Amino acid sequence: MTTVVPVQSAQQLALAEIDAGLAGFASTVNAKGAALQASDLLPYLDPDLLDDGHNRSQFAAEAAGWMAGATVAFSVLEIRSLDTGANTADVVFRFTLSQGGDTQTENVEFFFKKSSGTWLMSGNRRIAMVHFAAEARSHQGLQPPASGQVINVDIEPPLGAVTGVTVSGGGIWSSTALTKGPVISDPAGNRDHFYLASSPLASPPAAGTPFTVALATAGGPVAYTLPLNAWTSERIAFTNLSGFSLSTARLGSPLTVSWTLPKTFPIANMDFTVMTFTGPQSSPDTMSCFESGPRLAANATSTTVTIPATCAGRPVVQLNLNLGVNGANGERSHAIYEMQ
């Protein structure tokens, strides 16, 4: 992304003040180290913060748990809009997190609000987690669907806040309804899960193509228009797993998982997660739990994780191993290994 240098005095002042606020946030995280608490971050957060459906206290707790013991840095890339009357700004910044010699980067778009002379983080202002990605997907495991270049949509609102979701765009979907899946168990508050993935696309729409996701709520529809990220056709895959039954996952015991890496684009970061299920993945009566694996270096080719045998107090009967590799220019490769 190209850095936009503000030319108006109000923009220049906002840039300097937001930079200073982010530097203070980083300084607090780095100084507290493993002792970081949610309360340490609250002074940097707008009381009306809204981020992926999380409020200020929920965001602080999640961020503190994720950043504790790590070193972080922020760099403002662009002020997309500035409202001097409302004292709000739409900002894109680069977030860098380092721990144990490993470093990952991510570009983040956040809103900021100025209160009592200080710019505070106000979140992405979305009522739900909205994951929308063009990706090269590999399906492995039990009766896998076809692999290839797909567009994946995942919406996770707070429980009961959204009654339905549709997506339109790219000549692929027109007010197409997402499937409502299992409820996601979350200590911060359970979430509904709506999802949809295209079939493999022989002629995928270009990067930057706009898609609109519309969420139905009691207060009326809420819509977000998102540009398609950059494509890659290079798929990754898990390499050391040979069985599809839950015995392969060694529930309750350490499991080492290995994979291939893409070679055609530079890697910015990667994430390894496990989704466990108490029943069929297609059933809204099923509960699902989200288990994050260890933080990974950008060149990692394996990790070890212990997958719990229960989810929300019920036995796990299915699970998906998920590995996402994100490129520096927006590319994404995603491998899914399903077991039951």
Image: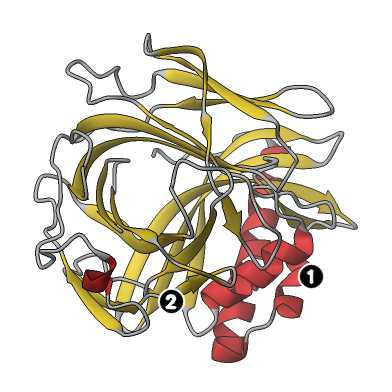
- Indicate left or right for 284 with 47 as reference: left
Give the quarter of the image for residue 132.
Answer: top left
Amino acid at circle 2: Pro
Q: Which residue is mark 1?
A: 43
Label 1, label 2: how far apart the Cα atoms are: 35 Å
Earlier residue among tags 1 and 2 = 1
Q: Is residue 10 above or below residue 61?
A: above
Residue farthest along the bottom direction in this orientation? 35
Q: Quadrant of the C terminus?
A: bottom left
Q: Residue at x 15, y 59 (%)?
A: 238
- Indicate left or right for 282 with 266 as reference: right
- Indicate left or right for 3 with 185 as reference: left
Q: Residue at x 79, y 70 (%)?
A: 43
Foreground of the two, 230 or 130: 130
Crowding at dot 1, Cα within 10 Å, few <14 / some 14-19 / many 20+, comes out as few
Q: Which residue is mark 2?
A: 308
Give the quarter of the image for residue 213.
Answer: top right
Q: Residue at x 61, y 58 (%)?
A: 19
